Image: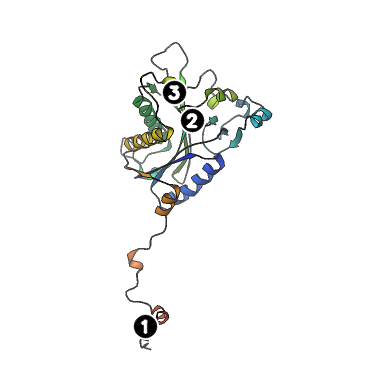
Amino acid sequence: MIHALYLGRVEYDEGLRLQAEIAALVAEGRLPNVLLLLEHPPVLTLGRNAKRSNILASDEMLAKRGVTVHEINRGGDVTYHGPGQLVGYPIFDLRTLRNSSGSHMGPVDFVRGMEEALIQLCRAFGVQAGRICGLTGVWCGLADQPNTPARKIAAIGIHVARGITSHGFAFNVTTDLKDFALIIPCGIPDHPVTSLKEEIRPPVQLPTLEAIAHQAAQLFGQVFGEEVLVIESLKALRDRAAPKFPAEDTPLQTPHEVERLLGAPERPVRA
């Protein structure tokens, strides 16, 4: 089971805090796998292997444009998040998932599954996308324009702790691509970025980011072989994680102290 929740625009610090909260609940078995879907204000994130030199803008320029910088524990290099970009944080217990051979899914299999879901999301809008051997992410222009560099439409980077994943993907829908000039995306020079808006052809029109988020959630369910339940709010998700007392904890008879407080007749106490 995957619980999918669309949160709208969320500050990056809050996104980190939510991931930690939900990862703890998944690890405790109080929630099934959870897919958070949202967008962030402009922010640059530096993964474990990132080089600060791949940020091309000065600190002054970033501050002037309201772009914050965060060093985080996911894999990969520098990535941009901003309005119009669908960000997905799958908080999954890998031990609940199986790969094509029936074994427990590892981090590499999981990343490939994420790529497949996003490739299928592109296909739903008539956009051909795929992988590049040796690189992580989803790319356009691999077949239709073989003499030009491939264009990256989705970046992926995850962290795994105690078998629980966090961080995830950034899929450009209507993202302002000029903001990627602030960095060398993912530390890979000479590979431009693109968006769904740039790649679709008329008469295809883009729905809202929320509608695309729900499509992405259903495709995650198909790729990972899990039923998807859409959760309406963060409160509803937290309510599902509330501790439930098992029936065997119910006493066979009302405790003597409770009866006394309720005004019930005293029962004799046998020595």
Residue 195: x percent and y percent? Answer: 46, 24
At 54% from the left and 30% from the top, the residue drawn is: 79
Residue 115: quarter of image: top left
- Residue 194 sits above or below residue 227 on the image: above
Q: What amino acid is found at the position of numbered circle 2 in the picture? A: Gly
Disc 3 target residue? 197
Alpha carbons under labels 2 and 3: distance apart: 10 Å
Q: What amino acid is found at the position of numbered circle 3 in the picture? A: Lys
Is label 2 in a helix, a strand or a loop? Answer: loop
Tag 2 or tag 1, which sits nearer the N-term?
2
- Residue 48 sits above or below residue 145 on the image: below
Nearer to us in this view, 153 or 126: 126
Q: Residue furthest top?
A: 147
Mark 1, Cα crowd under 10 Å, few <14 / some 14-19 / many 20+, is few
Alpha carbons under labels 1 and 2: distance apart: 64 Å
Mark 2 vs 3: CB contact within 8 A: yes
Disc 2 target residue? 84
Residue 71: x percent and y percent? Answer: 59, 37
Quarter in which the N terminus is drawn: top left
Disc 1 target residue? 264
Nearer to us in this view, 260 or 202: 202
Is label 3 in a helix, a strand or a loop? Answer: helix
Nearer to us in this view, 249 or 75: 249
Q: What amino acid is found at the position of numbered circle 1 in the picture? A: Ala
Determine which of the numbered discs, if any, sits on residue 90 in the image.
none
Quarter in which the C terminus is drawn: bottom left
Q: Is residue 203 visible?
A: yes
Q: Is residue 77 visible?
A: no
At 44% from the left and 10% from the top, the residue drawn is: 147
At 36% from the left and 22% from the top, the residue drawn is: 204
Residue 113: x percent and y percent? Answer: 38, 33
